[in-house]
Every structure is written in C-alpha cells, then in structure tokens.
C-alpha cells in the first residue's frame, strides 16, 4: 500500500474536489482494489459508514456496518478490525485494503459519513471488544 498510497490519495482528492466519483476515478479505483471496491461502494451507498466522536471531544473512530456479517468494524487510519484486513492485508499481503477501510475513505471524501456522538466509555467499550460488535452486544 505504501507505493500506491500517493496514487490512492490523488484519487480520493479527486473525489473531494468533484464531490462525486467520475468514471475515470472509478476505473482507477477498480484497477487498484478489484472486487473490494464494489463491496466498499455497497457500504457507502447503503449509508453504513459512521464516524464516532467522543464527548468530550478528544477521540474519534470510524465504523462500517457489514451487512453480510451483521457486525460493525472499527477503522482507524490505516487499520480495520475485520478478519479480512488481518488475514489478507497484513498477513498475506494479497490486498491493499479491506472493504471497510476503503468505504470509510470514499464516504468521507463524498461527505456521506454520518457523525455520531458517543461517550468516552462507549468508545472504550468498543475498543475493548476488539473493535467489533454485533447488534446483540
């Protein structure tokens, strides 16, 4: 991802500048991320990306709801708590991002990320639970 980071950042900046994803940007993202892009766009289209802002405002994290797993995963900068990120991005280096991390970046660039205020305790509880939880939690 390090070698591709400047290219990816340029693509995200293009989305921010134009406030939408152009066909050429979409094609470039597709060449970088393959089928992961389609899964990420599904999350963005379904408004499944959130920014959790703690009160008092000292910390934040992003969350993406995974419809297939019926769980939320935490995304922090260049890390996601989902199993795909751990296995395919970090260990096997088969992908440069998981769908949750990619969805967060695209959603933020489009201004679609929903902000939610949470207490410091709630944010700490999410982190203590390995950054993921299901609706039952």
Image (tube, rainbow, N blue to C red):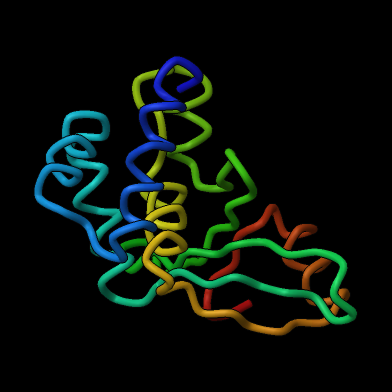
Taking the spot 47% from the left edge, 29% from the top edge, the residue there is: 87
Specify the quadrant of the image occupied by residue 18: bottom left
Taking the spot 73% from the left edge, 64% from the top edge, the residue there is: 60
Instruction: Quadrant for the C terminus, please.
Output: bottom right
User: Measured along the vertical axis of the image, is residue 26 above or below residue 116?
Assistant: above
User: Measured along the vertical axis of the image, is residue 133 above or below residue 97?
Assistant: below
Q: Where is residue 89 in the image (x, y as percent from the top left)?
A: 45, 27
Residue 31 left/right relative to 45:
left
Residue 80 left/right relative to 23:
right
User: Measured along the vertical axis of the image, is residue 8 above or below residue 52?
Assistant: above
How many labels, in total? 0
Q: Position of residue 33 (x, y in %)?
A: 26, 34
Between 103 and 121, the one lying in front of the other is 103
Instruction: Quadrant for the N terminus, please.
Output: top left
Taking the spot 55% from the left edge, 64% from the top edge, the residue there is: 63
Taking the spot 45% from the left edge, 69% from the top edge, the residue there is: 49
């Amino acid at each position: 991802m390090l070698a591709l980071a400047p290219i990816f950042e340029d693509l995200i900046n293009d989305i921010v500048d134009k406030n939408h994803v152009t066909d050429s940007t979409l094609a470039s993202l597709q060449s970088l991320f393959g089928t992961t892009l389609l899964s990420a766009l599904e999350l963005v289209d379904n408004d499944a990306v959130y920014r959790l802002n703690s009160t008092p405002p000292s910390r934040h994290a992003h969350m993406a709801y995974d419809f297939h797993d019926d769980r939320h995963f935490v995304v922090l900068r260049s890390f996601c708590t989902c199993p795909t990120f751990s296995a395919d991005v970090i260990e096997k280096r088969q992908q440069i991002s998981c769908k949750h991390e990619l969805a967060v970046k695209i959603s933020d660039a489009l201004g679609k990320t929903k902000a939610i205020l949470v207490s410091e305790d709630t944010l700490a509880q999410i982190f203590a639970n390995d950054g993921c939880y299901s609706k039952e939690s």
